[in-house]
Each structure stands twice: as C-alpha cells, then as structure tokens.
Image (cartoon, grey):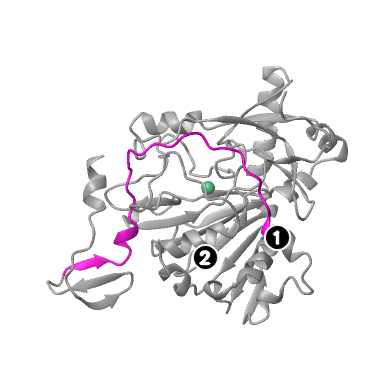
Amino acid sequence: MSTTETETQQVTSNPTLKLRGNASVNAQGQEEYRYSHLLPVFSSTTYPPLTPFEHSDPAARALNHSNPRAFLDNATNVIEITPNLGTEVHGVNLRDLDSDGRDQLALEVARRGLMVFRDQQDFIDAGPDFYLQWGRHFGRLHIHPTSGHPQNYPELHLVYRDANSTFNFEIEDSITSTSWHSDVSYERQPPGLTTFFLLSQPSTGGDTLFTSQVSTLKKLSPQFVAFLKTLKAVHSGVEQANFSRSGKRGGIVRREPVEHVHPLVRKHPVTGEEALYVNRQFTRRILGLKREESENLLKFLYDHIDKGGDLQARVKWTPNTVVLWDNRVTAHSAIVDYKDSKERRHGARITPQAERPIPALDGLSLDD
Ligand SMILES: [Fe+2]
C-alpha cells in the first residue's frame, strides 16, 4: 500500500524543542509523533512454517517461591476488577522486574487471566529491543503472518488506526465490532502470556473487552462439559490470510496460513484450570460431528461467550497502561467506537507462544 511508505518515514534529525503529549515540536514548529519509529511497515519478507518447540512455562518456576506474589509487595494499590477476572495494579514498575519477578507475574496473570498495570512510561519508552527481551522471558516470540510491525522488528504485532488509514480488520459490514477471540489460535502452539500497550490512544473509546474462559466453562452443566471435553476442533488462519491477500489490511501474507486441531476444553499447564477454547474468529468445525451438529454447537458456545457480561472485564486505556493476559484461559475483543473522532490509536503486542493446548480430558488424541 502506498500509504505505508508515507507513514513509516522516520522523523527528521531536527532537534526536538518541546514535548507535548505523545508529540514533539521540531525547530520548524512541526509536530513529530513521538513513536514514529514504531509505526507499521508491511515488508514483503516471507517466513517458513513455524516448527514445534518445547515450551517451558515461567509461571511454573514461581510455584516454588515462598511468596509468588512478592512482586506486588511495593504496589500502592491492587484492585480486583471483577471477582473472577482481572487485577489492576498501581505503583509497580514492570521495567524493574527481574527474572524472578517476571516468573511471578506470569503465574499471577495465569491465575487472574488479566492484569492491568498503570503508569508504565518507563516500560513503554524502553523501546523495541527491550520489548523483545521482555517477551522472550515468557516464550518463543511469534511473528504474525499478516500484521504490520515496526521496521526491523517483525516480532512486534501492531494495531494501528488514524484519520487516514487502518490496518485492522474492517467492520463496515457488521452491526458490531465485538469479535471474541484468543490470538492466532490457529497455530499449533498458540500464545500464552501476552503483553499489549498503547503508544497513542483516542481521548475516549477504544477500550478492550476480556472474558474468562474458565468462567464460561463453569457456567455449563457437568454433563455438558463432560461431552465438550471429548471434542476437538479445527482452528484456521486461512480466512485471515485471504482477507489480507484481497488487499485489505496491509495486503501481505508473510507465512502461509495453517490449520490445527485443538481440544474444545484445554487445561492450563501450571494452574491446572480448565478453559473453553473456541472462538468465532478462528474455530471452524468440530471433528467427528455432523455439519449441523458442529455449527449449532459452536453457535451455542459463541452466543454463551457473547452474552456473558457477568464474566467479563473492560479495560480503559489511560495513558501509559500495560496490559497482560493469558490467551489460554481468556478471550478478548477490540471495541472500535472512536472512528468518528479521527484520532490515532497505535498499539503494540508482544506475543510469546506457549505449549500445544493440553486436552482437559486425559488421553484425548489431537492427531486423528
Ligand atoms: Fe487479539
């Protein structure tokens, strides 16, 4: 896309005179975007298929710690956003967490599903090399097959919208922007602990919705859950790739799309909690069922996730907020309610992959 080159030009060498919000003013009085070096590019570089790897979960190491929540000792405020999902933390500088603290963080995110850290300017301004170093503590970093990334940092997944452009999925043909999903669940080893933050945000709107897939599962009857545990489904990246190939979003496919089979109910490798693992964005069919059975069962589960307001949390992005969630036990959705404001929303995601989903039902084979 021609707009890409324009938008990714680097800031000139003019000396910065004054900071104003996330913009600075140069000697000519022009505003420069503070994070212009992190604007998306859509390179034509392609990558081979991902290869399996052994994931060692950092949260497991924290289980042996005498106080696995010690990293929160200096917090000035810790708020449970809802009883079963989400914790908001003030007064902890994530950039200062050592290896031990990061392990504890991973365990706490696994237990709470979602953690929101306010006042993280240090973290956000530490820059892309730090982001990679941070993410690699938690797993092998995923390179998204179709999204934009900062120049030379393909491991950083960007979401971006401004007055002139969008590289997100368009929603013009839908009555809602709500689209519950677990990130890139089509991969053989989908992400676990995921970090996301905004570099620039609209003055209001653009919140993110989360739901607990542990809680959505618990709402169902034991007999029904027992049946779900026997099932597995195909998750596909084909539609996402075709969407990009059709010229929408950034128009690139850097790695050929894949499909993988995952259990409908997965077990977290560290907490042992069981979670529903289907999403409308990537789950396509349940194996072993007739087409109508699969379609109706998936529709029931998606509807159940959609309307579970009593299981959901909503994150409002005050400036310098860093959010972490565990993609194995939660689902989330963007909210695109700020388009009319023409304001910029620019976010970066650090996406370590985790284990191949573990079936909650012992012995369920995923290779059939
Ligand atoms: Fe997502």
**Residue 303 location, x and y as percent?**
65, 38
Q: Is residue 85 above or below residue 353?
A: below
Q: Quadrant of the N terminus?
A: top left
State whether residue 83 appears in this view.
no
Front-lying residue, 302 or 49? 49
Q: Secondary structure at mark 1?
A: helix
What numbered label is drawn on residue 59?
1
Q: Is mark 1 within 8 Å of ligand 1?
A: no
From the viewer's perspective, is 89 left or right of 316? right
Magenta span has 222? no
Q: In the rendering, at what x and y percent does residue 2 appear? A: 22, 41
Q: Is the residue marked by circle 1 packed among few (<14), some (14-19), or many (20+) residues within 10 Å?
A: many
**Magenta span includes 51:** yes
- The residue sitting at 19% across, 75% down in the picture is 15
Circle 2 crowding by C-alpha within 10 Å: few under 14, some 14–19, many from 20: many
Please state the horizontal and vertical placement of residue 126, each as a whole percent of the image: 43, 69
**Residue at numbered disc 2:** 322
Q: CA distance from mark 1 to mark 2?
A: 19 Å
Kindly identify the amino acid type of the residue bearing the numbered disc 2: Val
Element carrying mark 2: strand
Q: Main secondary structure of the magenta part?
A: loop
Q: Is residue 46 above or below residue 216?
A: above
Q: Which comes before the other along the chain, label 1 or label 2?
A: 1
Residue farthest toward the top in the current orientation of the protein: 290
Mark 1: which amino acid?
Ala
Say which of marks 1 and 2 sits in front: 1
Q: Position of residue 29 (x, y in %)?
A: 15, 72
Q: Is residue 15 above or below residue 192?
A: below
**Region of the chain picked out in magenta, as a range:** 30-59
